[in-house]
Image (spheres, rainbow, N blue to C red):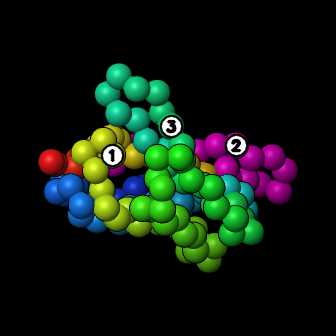
Amino acid sequence: QVQLVESGGGLVQAGGSLRLSCIASGTIVSINDMGWYRQAPGNQRELVAVVTKGGCTNYGDFVKGRFTISRDNVKNTVTLQMNSLKPEDTAVYYCNMYIAPTLVGGRDYWGKGTQVTVSS
């Protein structure tokens, strides 16, 4: 059974930094896209950043060069380095991976989320 576990959330002052990590465990044949999404109260879940198996990245418009996503294909981890944090970045951040647990097929898996709170 595949599980994603996030770590690294917390409380930080505006302008500060946080580093989120997510590790996948279980029976894994391959992982395609790895990404981070976030959801603030009353808002829809939105893309923060995604990195493909080949290393191509895409970021939400609001990131504007502040965040960097990276992955380790050996350790099955994805990391989000967040700098210059703003109060509007406050949300629950979710790890997402498209994982194939067998040679045929795959699906999206989600972590339980980690809270990021940025104080002004």
Please rate how many residues cluster around mark 1, counting C-alpha atoms within 10 Å: few if below 14, some from 14 to 19, many from 20: many
Q: In this view, does 97 lie to the left or right of 38?
A: right
Tell me the number on the disc at residue 62: none
Q: Name the residue under label 3.
A: 46
Say left or right for 54 vs 43. right
Q: What residue type is labelled 1?
A: Asp
Q: Could you tell me residue 40's position as x and y percent?
A: 35, 33
- Chain-order first, disc 2 or disc 3: 3
The image position of residue 44, as x and y in percent, is 46, 27
**Residue occupying the point 50% across, 37% down:** 46
Distance of label 1 from label 2 (alpha carbons): 28 Å
Vertical relation: 95 (above or below) 21: above
Q: Is residue 53 visible?
A: yes
| Image depth: mark 1 or mark 2 in front | 1
The residue indicated by pointer 2 is 107
Residue sitting at x 22%, y 49%: 118
Q: What element carries label 3?
A: strand
Left or right, 46 with respect to 115, comes to right
User: Which of the two residues, 95 or 3, is positioned nearer the viewer here?
Assistant: 95
Q: Spot the residue most to the front.
A: 64
Disc 1 target residue: 89
Name the residue nearer the viewer: 74 or 115: 115
Question: Upstream in the sequence, badge 1 or badge 2?
Answer: 1
Q: Which amino acid does label 2 sit on?
A: Arg
Kindly indicate whether the residue at mark 3 contacts the one at mark 2 (C-beta within 8 angstroms).
Answer: no
Q: Quadrant of residue 13?
A: bottom left
What residue appears at the point 40 percent right and 56 percent down from the top-left corner?
A: 6
Q: What residue type is labelled 3?
A: Glu
Secondary-structure class at tag 1: helix
